[in-house]
């Protein structure tokens, strides 16, 4: 039976998304370690299906300024991936790569923004490659785009894109441990419903 909303996914489906997340985090930790020149590991990710308001409460205050890297998926799976970048994570990256830190998101220059786009792209690509490999589907990724806005505004992007299909989001959260420092990692994965059904079918999951 096909699902019509994210929250109709059964436990087995969520477990498989979690498994994809575990492989993706392992791959992204390896890539980040190479880029930052530091030891990077990641905790086992948690997968939650959250409403818009629940997602904001989980991540922080709706008026909190954050950065986010957005990538669109096309091919056999269509949808969005959104990686949230908070100031502590940004400064860990910038201090490792460029030996500097910022106090405000709006201090980011073109070079620093490009580095953060690349970091976000590495993390998102790691998840998508794991999903593509496990399910044997073809997924193309757009060029990453970075935005700085209030958290509520950032999270409205996927809701505007897919709100007509679902009022829920798929949140993959965990913690990066970079050089001994613990930093939160929050990734929103939003395949459209048709793509989610196709993915579950390819992974051998039935929702009946």
Image (cartoon, rainbow, N blue to C red):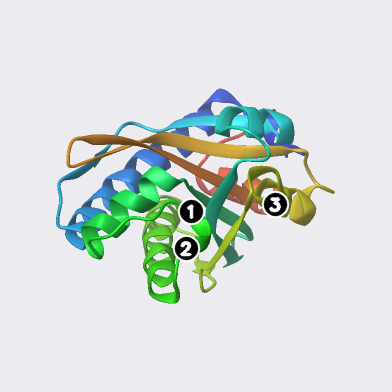
Q: Can residue 75 be seen in this view?
A: no
- Determine whether label 1 and label 3 are within 8 Å by CB: no
Question: Which quadrant, please, contains the C terminus?
Answer: top right
Image coordinates for residue 40, horizontal then vertical, percent: 21, 45
Q: Which of the marked residues, 1 or 3, is nearer the chain's N terminus?
A: 1
Cα distance in 3D space between marks 1 and 3: 25 Å
Classed neighbour count for the residue bearing mark 1: other residues with Cα under 10 Å, few (<14), some (14–19), many (≥20): few
- Which residue: 63% across, 44% down? 151
Image coordinates for residue 189, horizontal then vertical, percent: 57, 47
Cα distance in 3D space between marks 2 and 3: 26 Å
Would residue 171 appear left or right of 26 to someone viewing this image? Answer: right
Q: Which of the marked residues, 2 or 3, is nearer the chain's N terminus?
A: 2
**Which residue is under mark 1?**
104
- Which residue: 45% across, 75% down? 110
- Which residue: 26% across, 48% down? 29
Residue 10: mark in rendering: none
Q: Which of marks 2 and 3 is in front?
A: 2
Q: Which of marks 1 and 3 is in front?
A: 1
SS at mark 2?
helix
Figure check: 54 above or below 152: above
Given residues 155 and 166, the one toward you in this image is 155
**Which residue is under mark 2?**
107
**Which residue is under mark 3?**
158
- Which residue: 44% across, 66% down? 117
SS at mark 1?
loop
Q: Number of marks in the image?
A: 3
Q: Is residue 41 visible?
A: yes
Classed neighbour count for the residue bearing mark 3: other residues with Cα under 10 Å, few (<14), some (14–19), many (≥20): many
């Amino acid at each position: 039976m096909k699902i019509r909303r994210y929250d109709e996914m059964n436990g087995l489906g969520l477990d498989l998304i979690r498994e994809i997340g575990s492989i993706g985090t392992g791959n992204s930790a390896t890539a980040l370690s190479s880029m930052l020149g530091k030891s990077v590991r990641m905790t086992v990710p948690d997968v939650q299906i959250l409403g818009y308001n629940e997602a904001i409460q989980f991540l922080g205050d709706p008026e909190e300024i954050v950065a986010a890297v957005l990538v669109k998926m096309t091919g056999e799976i269509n949808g969005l991936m959104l990686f949230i970048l908070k100031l502590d994570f940004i400064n860990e990256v910038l201090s490792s790569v460029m030996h500097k830190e910022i106090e405000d998101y709006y201090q980011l220059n073109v070079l620093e923004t490009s580095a953060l786009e690349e970091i976000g792209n590495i993390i998102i690509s790691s998840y998508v490659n794991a999903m593509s490999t496990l399910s044997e589907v073809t997924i193309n990724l757009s060029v990453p785009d970075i935005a700085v806005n209030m958290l509520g505004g950032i999270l409205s992007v996927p809701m505007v894109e897919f709100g007509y299909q679902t009022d829920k989001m798929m949140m993959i959260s965990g913690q990066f441990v970079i050089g001994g420092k613990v930093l939160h990692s929050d990734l929103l994965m939003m395949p459209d419903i048709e793509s989610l059904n196709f993915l579950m079918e390819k992974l051998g999951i039935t929702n009946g």
